[in-house]
Image: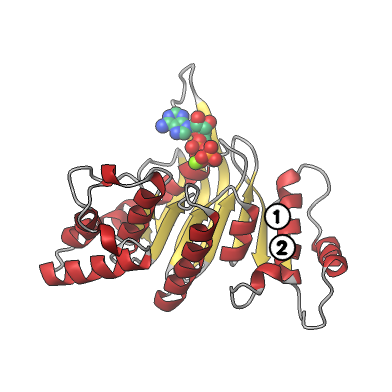
Amino acid sequence: MTAVSLTGVSKIFNPGRPDEVAALSGIDLTIPAGQFVSLIGPSGCGKSTLLRLIADLTPASAGTVEVAGKPAARARLDQEYGIAFQQAGLFEWRTVQRNVELPLELRGASRAERRARATEMLALVGLADFAGHYPAQLSGGMQQRVAIARALAVHPPLLLMDEPFGALDEMTRERLQSELLAICAQTGTSTVFVTHSISEAVFLSDRVVVMSPRPGRITATIDVELGTRDDAARQSPAYFAAITAVRRALRGPGPVPDIVEAEGAAAVAAPSPRTSGPASSATAAP
Ligand SMILES: Nc1ncnc2c1ncn2[C@@H]1O[C@H](COP(=O)(O)OP(=O)(O)OP(=O)(O)O)[C@@H](O)[C@H]1O
Ligand SMILES: [Mg+2]
């Protein structure tokens, strides 16, 4: 089963006008169900636009976008995904609890179910004590955590996240990263995650997709094989090797990212007899 399938997708804003912007070009990306994929690339390369295309919040100029085997528009109506974007986007007049309940309301869940699920999700993001507060009474980071709780509330098969942890302190960020991975593993959720952080992308992802400056194209995909994502993983040779591979790919153009070199670099930095198999593998796009 394929979670997301993009074929020949491009996006031009304001075509034919003086303010025309070619945001994305020739994007082909297939995400199997259950995979965690990060998008990384320079500011303005079209990461948010790509996520918005998948979410059917903006139409593609060319190509096809499918989610769960359906056209993106159908998938949106069927609530095939949850979204947490750069801005929390909470409803100011609803309490925290009722913000998290919203997608469950849309789905017609009973009051008791809504309440139980929202309480569970708020506990997960560490906001159990703020259920009755309004968004304006929370810090930016807390609002972002409410948005994450809301995105997860219906346990959607696909999560679309746009720098959801950008506003959080490092400790909260690491805790939420681990919680997110646990939820995804438990529920089989597929995730498309936009981040500026190479280390975050590597820690979270099965695959890191590297994009070029505008118009955004996929220039490399790097498979990450970290095994169990725990504190040890953050210090493993595989982790550092993948970070090196992503950094090289981001640095392009120039030599194609070379995983042999990256592995060698990691092995010099932190030799470990327990390392087995490739730490990661990089593929340069044609
Ligand atoms: N609604 C819009 N109308 C016109 N141009 C847009 C619109 N949305 C985005 N763009 C343009 O498309 C390009 C890609 O923007 P996008 O927000 O996808 O970048 P990004 O990779 O998410 O950047 P960042 O890392 O800064 O969030 C930019 O040049 C931006 O100006
Ligand atoms: Mg963005």
Name the one closer to the observer, 145 or 54: 145
Residue 273 on image: x %, y %: 82, 82
Q: Give x and y (percent) for residue 182.
A: 46, 74
Q: Residue at x 56, y 52 (%)?
A: 39
> Within 8 Å of ligand 1, the CB of disc 2?
no
In the rendered image, residue 58, in percent from the top left (x then y), is placed at 38, 40
- The residues tagged by marks 1 and 2 sit, at their Cα atoms, a distance apart of 6 Å
Please give the label number shown on residue 48: none
Numbered marks: total? 2
Name the residue at 81% across, 65% down: 266
Location of the N terminus (image quadrant): bottom left
Callout 2: 10 Å neighbours few (<14), some, many (20+)?
A: many
Graded by Cα atoms within 10 Å as few (under 14), some (14 to 19) or many (20 or more), the crowding at tag 1 reads many
Q: Residue at x 39, y 43 (%)?
A: 87
**Residue 272 shown left or right of residue 23 in the figure:** right
Q: Tag 2, which secondary structure?
A: helix
Q: Amino acid at mark 1?
A: Val
Q: Which residue is mark 2?
A: 242
Q: Residue at x 30, y 54 (%)?
A: 76
**Tag 1 near tag 2, CB within 8 Å:** yes
Q: Residue 79 sits in which quadrant?
A: bottom left
**Residue extending furthest top?**
18
Q: Which mark is residue 246?
A: 1
Any part of residue 225 in sight: no
How far from the left and from the top, in percent, is residue 192? 48, 58
